[in-house]
Image (cartoon, coloured by chain):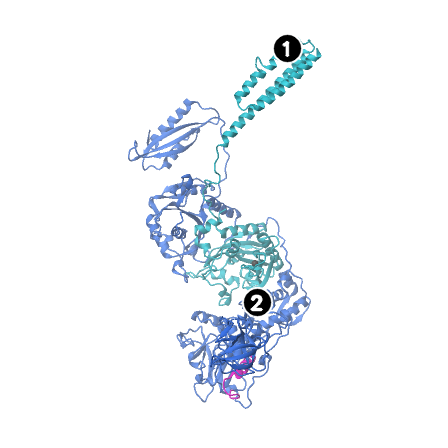
Amino acid sequence: MNDSLDARIESLATLAEEARKEFATATHEEQLNQLKARYLGKSGSLKTIMESLKELSPDQRPILGKTVNQTKQEVLQALEDRRVQIREEKRRQELAHRWIDLSLPGRQRDQGAIHPLRSVTRELFSIFRSLGYDVAEGPCVEDDFHNFSALNFPPDHPARDMQDTLLLKNGALLRTHTSPVQIRTMQANRPPIRIIAPGMVYRCDADVSHSPMFSQIEGLWVDEKVSLADLKGTLTTFARRYYGPDVPIRLRPSFFPFTEPSCEVDVGCVFCPRGGSCSVCHDTGWIEILGAGMVDPNVFEAVGYDPEKVQGFAFGLGIERVAMLKYGINDIRLLFENDVRFLRQFAK
Amino acid sequence: MKLSYNWLCEHVELDGLTPREVADRLTLSGLEVEAVEPIGVEYHPIKVGQILQIRSHPQADKLVLCQVEFGSGPCQIVCGASNIREGDRVPVIPAGQRLPDGTKISKGKIRGEISHGMLCSATELALPGDPSGIMILSPAVPVGKPLAEVLHLTDTVLDLSVTPNRGDCLSMMGVAREVAALFGRPRRYPGMLAGGELQADKGQEPAERHARVEIEDVQGCPRYAAAIMLEVTVGPAPDWMARRLTAVGLRPVNNLVDVTNYVMWETGQPLHVFDLERIRRHPAEPCHILVRSARSGEQMESIDHLVRTLDPEDLVITDGQHPIALAGVMGGVESEVSESTRQILIECAHFQPSRIRRTAKRLGMNSESSYRFERTVDIEGAPRVLARTVELVLQTDAGPAGRARVARGIVDAYPRPWRAKPVAMRVDRANALLGAKYTAEEMRQVLEGIEIEVVESSPQRLVTIPPSFRPDLEREVDLVEEVGRLVGLDRIEARLPASEMGFEHTPREGGTAQTVVPYRRIEQLERIRDRLAAAGISEAINYSFVSPGAIAALGYPQGDRHGQPVELANPLSEEWSVLRTSLLPGLLANVRHNLAHREPTIALFEVGAVFFADDSAGNGTGVREEQRLAGVLCGRRGTAWLGEVRDHDIFDLKGVVSNLLSQFAGDPGFENHGGAIGHLHPGVGALVTLAGQTIGVIGQIHPLVAERFDIASPVYLFELELDRLVGLGESTPQYQPFSRYPAATRDLALVVDHQLPYGEVERAIRGFANPLIEGFVLASIYEGEQIPADKKCVALAVTYRSLTSSLTEEKIDGIHGRLARFLCERLPATFR
Ligand SMILES: [Zn+2]
């Protein structure tokens, strides 16, 4: 009798195995439905085994009954798994016939460009803002006091030749540098002062490397103990953040009427190609990018600060030069021609 | 200023250094060397050769065959000259090399005889000398040596950019002083520059017998010294002098002019030579040099043959009555030296820098002389400079030896002698400015290195006497700068200034207008830029100046401040002669430029200042500046391959502007301008309002205005007053609760008067003010069939939704019906 139970359990296992194999070969849902009827239907194989239940002894019936139910569940699960497989396969085949050529251009409005001079200014803003500077602005039309006298340019001094001035018929002038903003800021505020002042400036000059209007950014830090060493540190930080962590700077003594000591500031050339000569720095390894110095005591006196009590540094940088180097622009006039073929190159 | 390295070596010992090393060190000490240029490299191939043997050419009567040794064994050279002898030393150029003028000498046969090079004439070498035959060299020159070396033809020219404060470095002596200090090398003083009395001939009359100097304008001329020479003979200067002058960019003229230039280059002191006989009013009497201010309207013909009308500002040298030179600027033609000049007065003076500068500028007569006077020359140097000049005039005199004579002594009017002014420097102050820790002793050494006398020295303080050639050293800080640059700015340690957190600028009591810009404003502006760029519009930057025509072309009405631009006094051109009152002239010029380059899509914006004459502007300049934001759209937009290309239209522009304004507080309004804005199309333009203020305009450029800018395509533009815009503040979104119940939409087609602005429809729906109306969108505006000619059909979709319940169909229909009736009455309108 036990043989009979074991044999039936055995045959159930075989049946489940067989069903799984057959399901796997089915390729359509109709086939699956037929197989379902064959195994699980009213006259299906499982039903037949179930019906033989009564041939067993009462204590064996529950054992076989349980096994039959388990087998039924297994077969059903296998069937449904296969059904999902078949459906997904069918969808896949359908989808495989539909494709869109994504090398085609997307529907996109042209991206406009922020002017390269403005992009550079923004970058400088964020560097100096992180160093605690405020932004200050002053007028483009200036008077002699703010543009020259207060900045220690004596009348009839050759230093004025450094800046060919565009004059207005009413006696005012177009500022030749952003330094008048230093004066206006000190006139408006008590020390300490810590500003950068961007803006357009004007000179009586026009060729490949000179534009009658160009942009500068001026920096000024005035406090009790700010020294040339601090200037060097500030500009070193600027150079590292703007040009890269290992880029050095070099101060060369120079002359500006409104600073003393004055210096030109070079940064290590980041354009030098490996081996081969560099057209940017002419193989000197240095690029001149800004002028700087300690604020001249005469400037403090002009704004009513006591030069014995405050000291500070100022620096000025030409945005065009930085932008032209950065983007490889060789003619300054391109920056003001507003040719869309030029501007579009800076869209991002 | 250009400087010859060979010449510099006469003023400072530079053994073992290269021009490059000297240049680099000068650059790092503040005398920027802009270029280091070797000269005479073209002479490198030329060697000194010796003619060993001369034979006749078998094929040609006029040619000879020379055996020449020039360093690599005797070889044959064919030559056509007749002035050569066996044993002569001559310049040889080997075959395969190029002459200084670039001509290549090829190896080959001349009439059947091989020639390994060429013997050169002076002309072929571009050297002075007899042009007719081969150049014969001194028998002392070593055979095989480069010619350039034996004739000193090579040199290095350093091009110095001297800052305006360093007039002392516009001379060999000044640069030599710096170099000597930087390298610790001894200076050298050629000839009379070492000091000593004028080399006058015994028995000569004193200079006073020939010239009397009187200074009327002592302010303008604190010193006037002169030397007198007789029986000089004018001729060309010797080669060595001409070569040096050429190297530094001066043109050799004759020995007198050249010597003055040479000495000016050596000492920085400009000199002038007068023909003494032409300035003496009476032959028997000394000439009378009177230095005075010019009389108004006085005239003088300068040596460039222009008649100059003078001004009392100008300082003149006169012969007692008439001007004979414009002091420090240029000589007069009447007293100019010529080939026949025999007697000369050499002027060595000191003039007030600002006077010279004004005159040179006013008359447009910048010269090497005025350039130096403007930057101040050494007032104490006169006797030494005159001694050197006289020495060189004697050396270069073209007459028989011993004929030229020198009067005894100099005439020297020096009414205001230079006085040494001590300048003190506190050691701790210097260190505080430099951020350094130099000792008093270090500072003293550095200052003494450039010949500044230190008269008092303690660990706390140095007292110095700056020399007469450094009038720029007047204050403590001037000395600090010298210490900083000579010790080397590279020795200063970099450090970041200590800064406190949360630093804010504090306005001064009674201070002027604030310059510090709130950071929020900067961010707002940047956001505007980003939004416009994201809308496909690129940022332009135009010059602040435009042509008056461009402003007139915009057709502002009479009396409008936009039509009255501020004028430049010295514009670079008519195109840039007035300050812009609008950003449009620039942007329209950009449109024209891009259309001319067949650019299909033009979308530009600009942020910038415009300018108006306004004496009440309160900034002392009489000009008010306002910030504007403007943009232009022109040409096509869209994606071609999707069939979506179309021309820009006014609604592209309005979309951009609406989007832009949405970040500011207040609802924007667009009111048809009805022709009020002259440069806008009368039917396509509106005034833009925000929070009740007019902040600008949008529209299509008036086709007639466009024509004036040579633009044939429609251009859509906006121009906004940025100051008003950012003054309005930003909009902050306020959360509105939204419904969880379903919405229902009903269509609404209203036939209204053709002239009725759609905005009225919107306003009317809002006026209905039913809280169940969630929103509405415009579906279409239809004109044409089935609509009367003077009407249009406005089709809308209205959405209804309640916050608190589901709405029944009946309820919705009820409200919708009431809305429709309300609108019909209010607008008025009819249904369709
Ligand atoms: Zn480089």
Does residue A31 sit above or below B317 in this rendering?
above
Q: Chain of mark 2?
A: B
Amino acid type, callout 1: Ser
| SS category of the residue bearing label 1 | helix
Please provide the residue range marked out in magenta.
Answer: B383-404
Q: Position of residue B85 (x, y in %)?
A: 53, 83
Residue at 48% x, 32% y: name it. Answer: A97
B389 magenta-colored: yes
Q: Amino acid at mark 2?
A: Leu
Work out whether residue B411 can be spotted: no
Q: Nearer the viewer, residue B766 or B554?
A: B554
Instruction: Decide which of B250, A210 is in the foreground and name it.
Output: B250
Q: Which residue is mark 2?
A: B31
Screen quadrant of the N terminus of chain A: top right
In the rendered image of the structure, the colour used to display chain A is cyan
Vertical comparison of B398 with A236: above or below: below
Q: In the image, are marks 1 and 2 on the same chain?
A: no
Q: Secondary structure at mark 2?
A: loop
Which chain shows up in blue?
A: B
Q: Tell whether B562 sits left or right of A248.
A: left
Instruction: Tell which subunit mark 1 falls on.
Output: A
Identify the main secondary structure in magenta: helix
The picture places residue A59, in percent across and down from the top left corner, at 70, 10
Local crowd size for mark 1, using a 10 Å CA cut-off: few (<14), some (14–19), many (≥20): few
